[in-house]
Amino acid sequence: QVQLVESGGGLVQSGDSLRLSCAASGRTFNAYVMGWFRQAPGKEREFVAVIRWSGSTYYADSVKGRFTISRDNAKNTVYLQMNSLKPEDTAVYYCALKSGATWSTQRRDYNYWGQGTQVTVSS
């Protein structure tokens, strides 16, 4: 069993930056992929970014060039550096984990989810 805990959310102004963290505990996988999703009020949960165990990354077009996903395997932690934040980025951000080495943008493919952390960007 794996547990994921997000932190680092908050209220910021447009153009500001935030760094989210996701700490994983429990079962250790030989290979795994971790990603970030977000859900805005009244909208479905959507893909944001993903990182493979090898370190390769992929981003949604809406955040490409502004967000950076990274990981520290020794600490079992994944980060999401968010720069140039926009009001459209306001959402609850969730980290998620799937076993295996193949990345996915589909939420149904992920096995474990955190509780989410709120990010609010004012104009």
Image: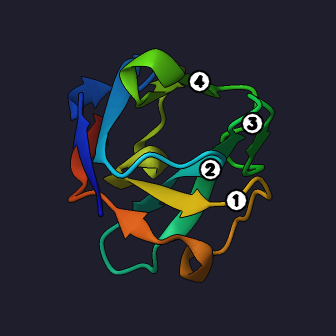
Task: Give the mark nearer the N terminus: 2 vs 3.
Answer: 2
CA–CA distance between discs 2 and 3? 22 Å
Q: Position of residue 61 (x, y in %)?
A: 78, 49
Give how far apart the Cα atoms at labels 2 and 4 are.
14 Å
**Residue located at (73% from left, 64% from top):** 104
- Which residue has dot 3 on it? 64
- Identify residue for label 2: 32
Q: Nearer the viewer, mark 3 or mark 4?
A: 4
Task: Please state which amino acid type lies under the numbered disc 4.
Answer: Ser
- Residue 82 in view (yes/no): no
| Of the image marks 1 and 4, the number of the one nearer the N terminus | 4
- Disc 1 target residue: 100
Residue closest to the eye, 13 or 21: 21
Q: Amino acid at mark 2?
A: Tyr
**What number is the disc on residue 70?**
4
Sequence-earlier tag: 1 or 3: 3
Q: Earlier in the sequence, mark 1 or mark 2?
A: 2
Q: Please give the name of the residue rendered at 69% of the width and 48% of the height, measured from the top-left corner.
A: 62
Image check: 15 left or right of 53? left
Q: CA distance from mark 1 to mark 4?
A: 18 Å
Horizontal arrangement in the rendering, residue 45 relative to residue 59 (left or right): left
Crowd tier of the residue under label 1, counting other residues whose Cα lies within 10 Å: few below 14, some 14–19, many 20 or above: few
User: In the image, which disc is placed on residue 17?
Assistant: none
Residue 38, position as x, y percentages in the image = 43, 59
